[in-house]
Amino acid sequence: MKNWKEIYNALSDEEKDKVAILRVMECTNGVIQHAFRDGEDYALSVDETRRAMKFSMGCIKRLQIPLKNETITFEPETEKLMREARDFYISGVKQGSDEDFAEFMAISEASAQACGLPRLIKARQILEDNVDDFPPNTLNWGLSYLMQFFR
């Protein structure tokens, strides 16, 4: 297992800002998907779910986040790091590898902690102000999910 905390802590502040935006978006997307699939009473409509997922998944796959006045892109080293995390996610969560799931959760914790709660809160606000594909208050769901890494 790599020392993910050391790796994420070594990122520049600018890259941590970008990672924070991506993490809030990823986690919001995850909560939206689970709520819809599980038929939760707070789940979004089919159209709202599709819209949020389409935006999120496009950003996650391309590692580009289009905002109103700019498109966030990552340095090559950060992009490689985020793709590695996604590979662990796919193997661990989607394909059921317990070892890769543990690695993915270690990455999730390290990236959230390296960003820090103030940066994640700011990232939520940036997304709220610049992306119309998430219904009101849903970005709070992703931020709430990330709170588990600060207990």
Image: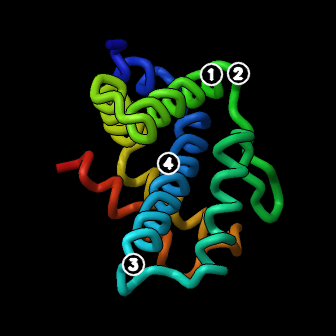
* Contact flag, marks 4 and 1 (Cβ < 8 Å): no
Is residue 129 visible in the rendered structure shown here? no
Q: Neighbour class for label 2 at 10 Å: few (<14), some, many (≥20)? A: few
Percent position (x, y) of residue 148? 24, 52
Cα separation, mark 2 vs mark 1, equals 6 Å
Q: Which residue is mark 1?
A: 80
Q: Which mark is residue 76?
A: 2
- Residue type indicated by callout 1: Lys
Q: Is residue 73 left or right of residue 57?
A: right
Q: Position of residue 7 (x, y in %)?
A: 43, 19
Q: CA distance from mark 3 to mark 4?
A: 24 Å
Mark 3 crowdedness (10 Å alpha carbons): few <14, some 14-19, many ≥20? few
Picture quarter containing residue 125?
bottom right
Alpha-carbon span between mark 3 and mark 1: 35 Å
Tell me which residue sits at (81%, 54%) in the image: 70
As displayed, is residue 24 above or below residue 75? below
Residue identifier under label 3: 39
Amino acid type at mark 4: Arg
Between the C-alphas of marks 4 and 1, the distance is 15 Å
Residue type highlighted by circle 2: Pro
Front of the two marks 3 and 2: 3
Nearer the N terminus, badge 3 or badge 4?
A: 4
Residue 73 appears at what percent x and percent y? 74, 39
* Circle 4 SS class: helix
Nearer to us of marks 3 and 4 is 3
Pick whichever, 84 or 43, lies toward us.
43
Query: Gap between marks 3 and 2, in whole Å?
Result: 39 Å
What SS does tag 2 mark? helix
Q: What is the C-alpha distance between the residues marked 4 and 2? A: 18 Å
